[in-house]
Amino acid sequence: MSQNFAQLCLDGQTYTLPIVEGTAGEKAIDIRNLLKETGYITLDSGYMNTGSCTSAITYLDGAQGILNYRGYAIEDLAENCQFIEVAYLILNGDLPNFGELEQFKRDMKRFALIHEDMIHFFDHFPPNASPMSILSTMVGSLHNYYPEMDDEEDPYGGITVTTARLLSKIRTIAAFSYKKSIGHPLVYPNAKLNYCQNFLNMMFDRPNMPYVIKPEVASALNKLLILHADHEQNCSTSTVRLVGSAGVNLYASISAGVNALWGPLHGGANQAVLEMLELIYADDCNYDKYIKKAKNKEDSFRLSGFGHRVYKTFDPRARIIKKACHEVLETLDIQDPLLDVALELERRVKNDDYFQTRNLYPNVDFYSGIIYRAIGIPTNMFTVMFALGRLPGWIAQWREMKEDKVNSRIGRPRQIYTGLTLRPFLPMHER
Ligand code: CMC
């Protein structure tokens, strides 16, 4: 921690505020005692400039387009790891050795089933129910079936077991919700398959039509999950922390995170991108029309998949995904006209003054949908895929918050009240 201080002048008085410095040199003014000492609060809607915690999980430099998990570059992890290894890294701080990875894989297999009673829940959602609402409901409900969370000594309880349960079961829930939505019989987890293969098999295997898992498909899914695994204090992760700060259980906190992710400005953007590309394609590739709409402040339309609160040069995940997109389509011998639409849209946006001056580049969601589509994932499941990937990050952030006994307290922002000041009460006949 730095020894520097900031000075603040208020009403003719000077206050000294400590500076906090992170391991990569980023600096913050610690204002935790500001209200007590000065009577002022800070106002920062959208948390444009507010650090809500210190964290040792993910490092992100938006100006340089850097993203590291636990000190490892995202590029190295995406190229060399299995998703489950990266999940272990994010959760535990180090990459697993052989024995640790084998144990973690065994846990994924051991906890893959969901209680049979929960399967009946799926029957009672309407046919067009959103897979994200189903996911958040089912994740929240897990608490009723697997509540053991506090006793770390109990082989069926404790946060380590709960973490493994959640990571394994979310995949089963996601695949079951898809099977139910199309009216097909469920495919149960298969202990012979790895994490990604198992998910694909539960999604696409059918009686009398066995699903052949192509290594390229499993590998593309693996990469996408790794690239989504954590992203420090984004909207859904902050939601998980905020909800968890009230003392609620992990499942309820994650369920809240799923709901936050659903929004089209956040994880829901991957679905919105694909729908937008389809729209442009169906409209004779009238790029100018949609670019013009996106720039028009009277119009709520935005180019989904462009822009980011933190990245101001490029999103490193988008770079990797764009490359993977070409590779996957080529290996699977798929010609998707939407890739051409995406490439042309990106080219035009890059040369457009409006987008240039606002630093709006493709983000993680811009090309991911084309890969999901190529591997057979339906559009309304895209954001569920994001949730599967983000789960290790949500859990690790929740656990970090709980373990920080010094700083962890209930999340409770302040406000500046702008309503009416006290006025006399009017009895009914005078209103
Ligand atoms: N299309 C058109 N204009 C945009 C866009 C866009 N996609 N994104 C931002 N702008 C404009 C915005 O209108 C504003 O213009 P002005 O300064 O004239 O008012 C300026 O750029 C700054 O935008 P902002 O909304 O103040 O920026 P923000 O940091 O609050 O929002 C964002 C970030 C990601 C919500 C926004 O860029 C956006 O809506 N993008 C489209 C949705 C999207 O792709 N979301 C996925 C984000 S990445 C994955 C994730 O985190 O889940």
Image (tube, rainbow, N blue to C red):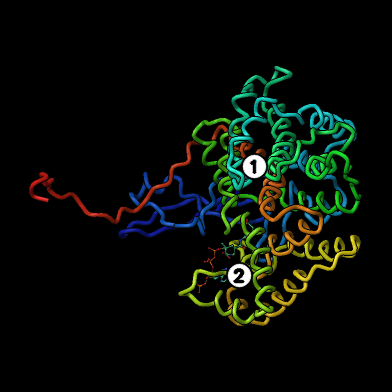
Label 2 sits on what residue type? Leu
The quarter holding residue 401 reads top right
Q: Badge 2: few (under 14), some or many (20 or more) residues near its Cα, within 10 Å? A: many
Residue appearing at x 69%, y 40% in the figure: 180
Residue under the image location 58 percent in, 56 percent down: 27
Q: Provide residue 393's location: percent of width, then percent of height.
A: 68, 44
Categorize mark 1 by other alpha carbons within 10 Å: few (<14), some (14-19), many (20+): many
Using the rendered image of the protein, determine whether residue 102 is visible from the camera's viewpoint: yes
How far apart in space, not on screen, are marks 1 and 2 (Cα)? 27 Å
Where residue 7 sits in the image (x, y, percent)?
44, 57
Q: What's the residue at 66%, 53% (across, down)? A: 380
Q: Dividing the image into four equal quarters, which quarter contains ligand 1?
A: bottom right
Up the image or down, 201 lies above or below 166; here it is below
Q: Secondary structure at mark 2?
A: loop
Of residues 326 and 375, the one nearer the viewer is 375
Tell me: 5 left or right of 201.
left
Numbered tag placed on residue 394 in the rendering: 1
In the visual, does 198 lie left or right of 116?
Answer: right
Query: Residue reaching furthest left?
Result: 429
> Residue visible at 38% across and 60% down?
9
Judging by the rendered image, the residue that carries numbered circle 2 is 303
425, above or below 339, in the image: above
